[in-house]
Image (tube, helix red, strand yellow):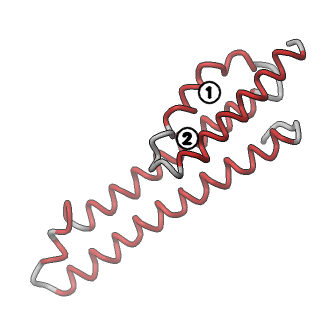
Amino acid sequence: MNNNQNRSLVTYNHITYLLYVLSYFTAGLLWIVPIFMNYAKRRDAEGTWLATHFDWQIKTFWYSIVWFIVGIGIITFALGSFGVSIMADSGNIAVGSVLLASVGFIIMGVAFIWHLYRIVRGWIALADGRPVP
C-alpha cells in the first residue's frame, strides 16, 4: 500500500469514528452509516495496521447492538409489554417488574458507556498511528 492510500484510509477512519460520536447527538440515526462505510473499505486495509481499526469498529457496533437488544428485551419482558404488569394488583409483582426492568436499563447503560469507551480508545490509537488490540 502506498503512502497516499494509507493516508486516505486514515482519514476515512477518522470520519467513521467522528460519525460514531455524532450518532450520540442524532438519537443514533448516524449509527448505521459508519458500519456500512467500514464494510465498504475493510478489504482495502487488509494486511495493514489500519485493518485493526476497521475490525475494532465493526465489533464495537455489533456487540453494542446485541447488548442493547438484550437490555430492551429484558425491559419489555419485565414491564409486560409496555407496563401492563406494573398495574397488576399485587405489589410484589410490580416491585419485581421494576427491579427486572432496572437490570435491563443497567445493561443498556453499560453497553452505551462501553461503546463510547471503544470509540474514544480506537480514535486515540488512530491519531497516534497505532493499531488497536
Residue placed at 80% from the left, 47% from the top? Answer: 124
Is disc 2 surrounded by few (<14), some (14 to 19) or many (20+) residues within 10 Å? some
Q: Nearer the viewer, residue 129 or 70?
A: 129
20 vs 49, left or right, is: left
Residue at image mark 1: 38
25 vs 58, left or right, is: left
Residue at image mark 2: 61
Location of the N terminus by quadrant is: top right
Q: Amino acid at mark 1?
A: Asn
How far, Cα to Cα, is label 2 from label 1? 10 Å
Label 2 element class: helix
The answer to the question of whether label 2 and label 1 lie on touching residues, with beta carbons closer than 8 A, is yes
In the rendered structure, find residue 63 and report the number of the disc placed on it. Answer: none
Residue placed at 19% from the left, 64% from the top? Answer: 80
- Residue 101 image offset from top left, x and y in percent: 34, 69
Which residue of the protein is positioned furthest toward the left in this rendering?
89
Q: Nearer the viewer, residue 14 or 36?
A: 14
Residue 105 position by quadrant: bottom left
